[in-house]
Image (tube, rainbow, N blue to C red):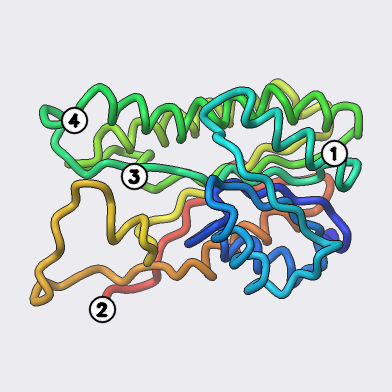
Amino acid sequence: MQSLENKVVVVTGASRGIGAAIVKAFAKEGANIVLTARDRARLKKSADESGLSKPRYHIVTADITKHSGVKKIIGQALKKFGRIDIFVNNAGVGVHKSLLETTEKEYDGMFDTNMKAVFFSFLEVIPIMKKQKGGQIINISSAAGLRGEPMIAVYASTKAALNALSEGVAREIRNDEIKISVLAPASVATDFSSNFIGKKKPNPASKAKKKLSVDEVAQAVVAMAKDNPNAWTSLSVLRPLSVK
């Protein structure tokens, strides 16, 4: 395992949920972290709760669905820390609706955040990592992207596309010592899953599956980042061990 001490890590969607937990987990490993999302106040709260001191973190507010927004993140990360060792594409959006009820705007919103933003990050980060002769990109996918799920078919398709993009590009650049890893968690106990856009509140009397905690997901991300330098986890599916 390699040390993450003083590594420079960029985390998108870092203001809450899984993203905030990832920030906290990398902070415990001694990493320097660039936190990015749209809400500066929430990003500051995430940084404070992680225990990071000011020299070890930098906040960037940006719209990652725009190429200019991703360029802004990369530019500020390099200006602050001089390099990028790990880039975590965590930001995501989902809509819980039948296909026939899903609007074009909702469809575009999911693909823009879950896929196009990752595409932009590849375009900007990979050349930097090639110059550095190494680095890692970790993409947060979903177990739903492995087979598709009813009522979230479009969301699942964005994650299936993310898995394919990640695998294809990873094969293109593996000789440059750049790793692209994908973590696909099953249901996670976050605001994102419980307040999935359009999702009806569950029946409290129904038997619900046990959910992963955000910390369990974050620990898996850190484990990927600590892989032996000559090996990497290309795709890992994270599931809870049991049901309630």
**Are dots 3 and 4 in contact, CB under 8 Å?**
no
Mark 4 or 1, closer to the camera:
1
**Are dots 1 and 2 in contact, CB under 8 Å?**
no
In the rendered image, residue 22, in percent from the top left (x then y), is placed at 61, 61
- The secondary structure type at the circle numbered 2 is loop
Type of residue at label 2? Lys
Mark nearer the N terminus (3 vs 2): 3
Q: Which residue is mark 2?
A: 244
Kindly identify the residue that appears in the image at 19 percent across and 51 percent down.
199
- Estimate the spatial distance between the alpha carbons at disc 3 and disc 4, rounded to whole Å: 17 Å
**Are dots 4 and 1 in contact, CB under 8 Å?**
no
Kindly identify the residue that appears in the image at 32 percent across and 57 percent down.
193
Mark linked to residue 102: 4
Kindly identify the residue that appears in the image at 87 percent across and 40 percent down.
79
Type of residue at label 3? Ala
Q: Which residue is mark 3?
A: 144
Left or right: where 226 falls relative to 83: left
